[in-house]
Image (tube, helix red, strand yellow):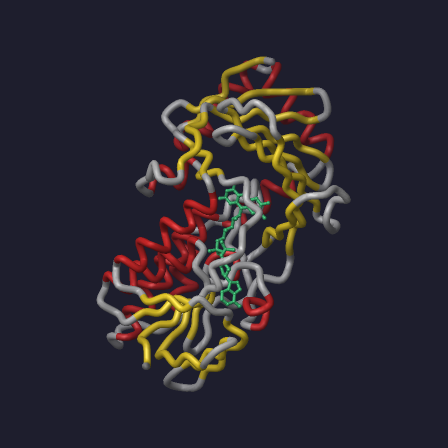
Amino acid sequence: MRYDVAVIGAGPAGSFAAEKLSSLGHKTIIIDPCYKKKACAGILTAQYAREYKIDDAYVERELKGIRLSFRDIRAEITYRKAVEYSIDREAFDSFNLNEAINAGAGLKKDIALSLEENDSSVAIRTTKEQIDADYAIVASGVSDLSRLCGGAKKYAYCVQQKKNEEPDDYFEMNLMHGGYSWSAPKKNHVLTGTSSLNGYPDIPGEKGLIPLEPAEKTFSNRFLLAGDAAGFVSPFEGEGIFYARRSGEIAAEVLSGAISGNNALASFEKRWKKEFDFSTLAMLARFLSNDMVLEAFVREIRDNERFRYWLDAFFSPLGFTVVTLL
Ligand SMILES: Cc1cc2nc3c(=O)[nH]c(=O)nc-3n(C[C@H](O)[C@H](O)[C@H](O)COP(=O)(O)OP(=O)(O)OC[C@H]3O[C@@H](n4cnc5c(N)ncnc54)[C@H](O)[C@@H]3O)c2cc1C
């Protein structure tokens, strides 16, 4: 069977791309082994919650705010108009995959080993067969296949642990030189993680990689890269689910246009660059990677009323307000 589009990977990038393609009437197949548990804090940000409907099927907690700390200085940012959610990541991924299947996409529980393209099609070799399609979306996250297809190459290294601690409704970020640690409250436990730019922190737990910058080129003649495969993660705080979903949707729209002969795959890059401002976020992340700046930032949130006013104005379009002294 020949497909219009083969989507490799059923994380948020792949599932939402496949759902959109199927709902636009394109014959779509998803390839994913469907067994891998992912390291993820599982926070759906205010940006995600503003844009998309949230389903109770995967929500563990509605969050009240963020606690920030640097050394012994602590500050708190509470939400005003915004809502953020702590989710069960496995339930979220299977919910989204089911939605794609309900919209008409097929699923092959298999691993893609290679992708070859020519002028009119792609051929994907899996452990069991060859899958032919007019186009492909590479949404295989941080993986060998994504790298083989020219995906993101620079990463932060994370280790995550489950702690049997009493959760509350705040996401905690402990900023430190060259990385940060975080705690995400779940229904009955807390997930903690530590990230570093210099290899995996030497602690036991589940390992995961976070791309640091977009791939040099995110389109080819016959395929597009979406989500982590393309390096679409905010370098400011590691948010990737929103960018995965949105880039999957943009990729689906661009391929739908290409199938009807209306646009070239290069327009994908123009579209995501218009929506995602990774360079400003990277600048902010670089700025905050300096110890003195970090210390001043958290201290000022805690102590300086004018700075809180300023931050409030800065954050209010996003729905946050900076309020608490600890
Ligand atoms: C420790 C950690 C914490 C994080 N916390 C957050 C957070 O709180 N909030 C947030 O927004 N983001 C967070 N992120 C980032 C977020 O997890 C990713 O950005 C997001 O999962 C990217 O989605 P994706 O669909 O691109 O890739 P993924 O979700 O990684 O999905 C890729 C899919 O491709 C499949 N696959 C891989 N190789 C192949 C192959 N060869 N053939 C077929 N299928 C294949 C995999 O099985 C997988 O299902 C975190 C990341 C880490 C590492």
Q: Is residue 142 left or right of residue 314?
A: right
Residue at 67 percent across and 30 percent down: it is 294
- Number of dots carrying numbers: 0
Vertically, is 206 above or below 168? Answer: below
Which residue is found at the position 72% from the left and 25% from the top?
71
Residue 175: percent from left, percent from top: 66, 32
Residue 311 shows in this picture: no
What residue is rendered at 49% in x and 19% in y?
309
x, y percent for residue 313: 44, 25
Give the quarter of the figure containing the C terminus: top right
Outermost residue to the bottom = 119
- Residue 191 lies, in percent from the top left, at 58, 35
Answer yes or no: is residue 3 visible: yes
Q: In the displayed structure, would residue 118 be above or below residue 92?
A: below
Which residue is rendered at x = 72% and y = 20% of the image?
72
Task: Compare residues 232 and 183 and report the one nearer the observer.
Answer: 183
Q: Residue furthest right?
A: 202
Left or right relative to 226: residue 262: left
Q: In this view, does 191 lie above or below 302?
A: below
Where residue 139 sits: x, y (%)? 46, 62
Q: In which quarter of the image is residue 62?
A: top left
Where's the N terminus, which quadrant?
bottom left
User: Which image quadrant for residue 75?
Assistant: top right
Q: Is residue 85 above or below residue 124?
A: above
